[in-house]
Image (cartoon, coloured by chain):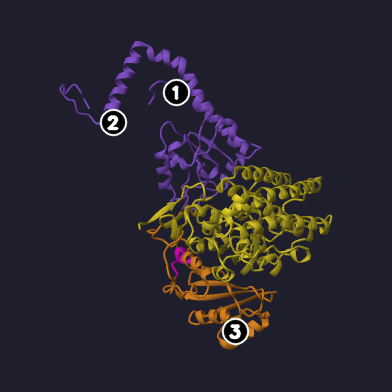
Chain colours: A yellow, B purple, C orange
């Protein structure tokens, strides 16, 4: 009986980002594990103390590049709380809509990644192809495919161009049909189900105690979504359902994200109905922030993101602290991996949707 | 190892024997003109083969890695240029560095570079790999990958569009076309 | 697990009954938020009260602030049933930054406390594994302190 430590990383096609998953194996079964992070640490929280408030917006985009709009959004919400600024109505609706489109884009990137992990390259090609349509929408809205620099303190940068709403509706109609094709491709495939069911079990009590949030928590049956329980922007006026699943394993996490994509399409359609047709989209903020602190919480595609800002009367923040959802989920991976085989590791870790930019900051 | 000093020596290590015999054959073929003839015929073919089947390493660091993944999507399709991503550095030609390199990662990256067999090239993709990018005052980011690895092609952008990445690879093709890759016994 | 929900006023009353020294920030009245400052000697018992009796089951964030003359650790605790987020600010002297760890209560605070130690040098008594997390093990500085100017600044 020889137990040994194996390094899975930092360069490993499965890890989607640079981190080292050290596992202690006894034959093929995993006995213990230890995640080693820090390969992408750039000292983000120290660098922002040397930048003015508007200069931090593109830096916040690059915190988690898979869902970059949501991070600049939560940063802008925190600064607006501190400076006590009220964002115009139309800007709030545009922000919520961009959030949901970003959520779909991030979940499609996750789907492409698990396609390569579990050996199904067709899913990778389908998901990246559909993601390109949403990136086209963002390109015509704000000019960039990935790190948008679109959110501003006090609103958004510019209004949607003409015919953008028509393009959006066409994309959503097409995408709903594609979602049904994904269900046929993955849900009804016995091979996929065998690789996902019963793995990585984590009960609701363990998940809450470990600090897990987001789709991984809702896959354990806990009904908590910040858009519903602690609403921000316009989510309390919209009509949508929370997506939960009771199976507590990898299969449940997969189903929750697929349901969330469908739910995001419904939310965007609702926003298009309720949005004011015209109006201001931006308010001019003051240059310096008052002395004090502020927090803002938001439902990122990966979990709960929170920023804590300390202002000191100048035009640069004194301290900006970031809560990244994946930082906490990664600390719970030893619990998730105990007792499974090495070949199950890509399946379990892939369902957590790892993005190392926000974990290491 | 100077053979003239030891005319009766028969012991050599395997590496020394290979280097010596390669050198002898190279000198012989050069002197008789055989090398020039073989190269004129075969070198364009080998060069064409190496150029159009560049295998990059499956190594994604940060934001530019998502654009690298988007480049494999059906819209931009880098596989038509012969680029198949390989997971092991022993099977790769090109090291595509996409994203900022932290001081913790620097020795691992240097080791990956040294594990790749010759001939190999390095492409620095994105602002962070070229010069450190937006993280110019960070205590943990290396200001440019070319401080510890020799770089052949730089692709600017933050992040560069997939078309820009393909353009960078085509520039590498040009560079290979004008170089001596594919010659007989080239070191 | 009983599903009793509390309002912000009920939480505030219960906490001030058990710990009269806790100072509440009355100037900021927001829905579903409560801001308080506590002393480090009562921190662990305060958190135990919040978790066991008031149903605050989730620790969102533990971070540190360097205020040049003192350190501060800031805790953000959330209750899923009552939908309230609390903020507790604890002051620490600059030459002795030691505070009790809340990891035995909430597992989610584990890596947050390690990271605060890594960046500031604040020691959390009772933490199961207080080692450096993001920086290499033999790094000699605590980079987020205001008197540390590593890098190109």
Gap between marks 2 and 1, in whole Å? 22 Å
Q: Is residue A80 left or right of residue A1?
A: right
Quarter assignment of residue C37: bottom right
Image coordinates of residue C127 in percent, x first then y, are 44, 71
Main secondary-structure element of the magenta-colored stretch: helix
**Residue B158: assigned label:** none
Q: Residues within 10 Å of mark 3 (few under 14, many from 20)?
A: some
Residue at 44 percent across and 33 percent down: it is B120
Q: Chain letter of disc 1?
A: B
Q: Which residues are magenta?
A: C116-122
Mark 3: which secondary structure? helix
Mark 1: which secondary structure? loop
Confirm whether residue B71 shows in the render.
Answer: yes
Gap between marks 2 and 3, in whole Å? 77 Å
Gap between marks 3 and 1, in whole Å? 78 Å
Residue designated by label 1? B182
Quarter assignment of residue B3: top left
Mark 2: which secondary structure? helix
- Quarter of the image for the N terminus of chain A: give it: bottom left
Q: Residues within 10 Å of mark 1 (few under 14, many from 20)?
A: many
User: Would you place residue A21 above or below residue C19 in this image?
Assistant: above
Q: Residues within 10 Å of mark 2 (few under 14, many from 20)?
A: few
Image coordinates of residue A146 in percent, x first then y, are 64, 47
Image coordinates of residue C146 in percent, x first then y, are 48, 64
Co-location on one chain, circles 3 and 1: no
Residue designated by label 2? B15
Q: Nearer the viewer, mark 2 or mark 3?
A: 2
Residue designated by label 3? C15
Residue at 63 percent across and 53 percent down: it is A68
Residue at 60 percent across and 57 percent down: it is A52
């Amino acid at each position: 009986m020889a137990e040994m430590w194996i390094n899975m990383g930092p360069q490993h096609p499965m890890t989607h980002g640079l981190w080292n998953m050290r596992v202690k194996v006894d034959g093929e079964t995993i006995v213990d594990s230890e995640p080693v992070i820090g390969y992408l640490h750039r000292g983000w929280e120290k660098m922002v103390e040397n930048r003015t408030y508007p200069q931090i917006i593109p830096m916040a985009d690059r915190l988690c590049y898979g869902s970059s709009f949501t991070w600049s959004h939560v940063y802008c919400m925190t600064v607006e709380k501190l400076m006590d600024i009220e964002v115009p109505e139309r800007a709030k609706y545009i922000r919520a809509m961009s959030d949901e489109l970003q959520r779909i884009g991030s979940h499609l990137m996750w789907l492409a990644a698990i396609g390569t992990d579990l050996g199904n390259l067709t899913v990778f090609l389908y998901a990246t192809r559909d993601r390109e349509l949403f990136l086209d929408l963002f390109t015509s809205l704000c000019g960039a495919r990935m790190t948008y620099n679109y959110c501003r303190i006090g609103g958004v940068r510019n209004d949607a161009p003409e015919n953008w709403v028509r393009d959006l509706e066409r994309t959503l109609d097409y995408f709903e049909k594609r979602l049904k094709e994904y269900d046929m491709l993955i849900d009804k495939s016995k091979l996929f189900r065998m690789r996902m069911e019963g793995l990585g079990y984590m009960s609701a009590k363990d998940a809450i105690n470990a600090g897990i949030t987001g789709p991984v928590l809702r896959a354990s049956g806990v009904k908590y979504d910040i858009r519903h329980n602690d609403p921000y922007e316009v989510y309390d006026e919209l009509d949508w359902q929370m997506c939960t699943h009771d199976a507590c394993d990898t299969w449940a996490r997969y189903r929750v994200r697929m349901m969330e994509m469908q739910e995001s399409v419904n939310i965007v359609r609702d926003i298009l109905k309720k949005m004011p047709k015209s109006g201001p989209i931006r308010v001019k903020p003051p240059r310096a922030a008052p002395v004090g602190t502020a927090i803002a919480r938001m439902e990122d595609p990966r979990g709960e993101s929170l920023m804590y800002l300390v202002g000191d009367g100048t035009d640069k923040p004194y301290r900006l602290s970031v809560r990244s959802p994946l930082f906490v989920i990664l600390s719970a991976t030893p619990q998730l991996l105990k007792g499974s085989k090495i070949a199950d590791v890509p399946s379990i870790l892939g369902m957590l949707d790892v993005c190392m930019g926000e974990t290491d900051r | 190892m100077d053979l003239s000093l030891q005319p009766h020596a028969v012991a050599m290590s395997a590496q020394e024997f290979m280097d010596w015999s390669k050198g002898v054959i190279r000198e012989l073929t050069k002197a008789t003109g055989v090398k020039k003839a073989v190269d004129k015929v075969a070198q364009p073919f080998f060069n064409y083969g190496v150029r159009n089947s560049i295998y990059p390493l499956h190594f994604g660091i940060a934001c530019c890695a998502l654009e690298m993944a988007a480049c494999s999507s059906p819209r931009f399709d880098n596989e038509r240029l012969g680029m198949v991503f390989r997971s092991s550095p022993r099977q790769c030609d090109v090291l595509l560095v996409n994203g900022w390199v932290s001081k913790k990662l620097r020795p691992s990256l240097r080791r990956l570079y040294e594990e790749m067999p010759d001939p190999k090239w390095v492409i620095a993709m994105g602002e962070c790999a070229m010069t450190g990018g937006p993280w110019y005052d960070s205590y943990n980011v290396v200001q440019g990958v070319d401080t510890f690895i020799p770089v052949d092609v730089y692709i600017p952008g933050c992040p560069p569009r997939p078309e820009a990445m393909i353009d960078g690879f085509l520039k590498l093709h040009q560079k290979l076309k004008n170089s001596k890759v594919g010659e007989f016994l080239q070191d | 697990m009983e599903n009793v929900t509390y309002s912000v006023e009920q939480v505030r009353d219960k906490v001030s009954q058990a710990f009269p020294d806790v100072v509440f920030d009355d100037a900021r009245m927001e829905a579903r938020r409560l801001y308080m400052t506590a002393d480090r000697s009562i921190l662990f018992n305060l958190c135990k009260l919040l978790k066991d009796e008031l149903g605050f089951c989730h620790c969102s964030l533990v971070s540190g602030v360097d205020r040049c003359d003192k350190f501060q650790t800031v805790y953000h605790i959330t209750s899923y049933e009552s939908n309230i987020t609390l903020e507790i600010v604890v002051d620490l002297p600059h030459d002795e930054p030691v505070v009790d760890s809340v990891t035995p209560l909430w597992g989610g605070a584990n890596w947050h406390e390690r990271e605060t130690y890594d960046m500031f040098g604040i020691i959390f008594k009772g933490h199961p594994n207080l080692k450096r997390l993001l920086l290499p093990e033999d790094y000699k500085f605590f980079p987020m302190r205001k008197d540390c100017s590593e890098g190109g600044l």
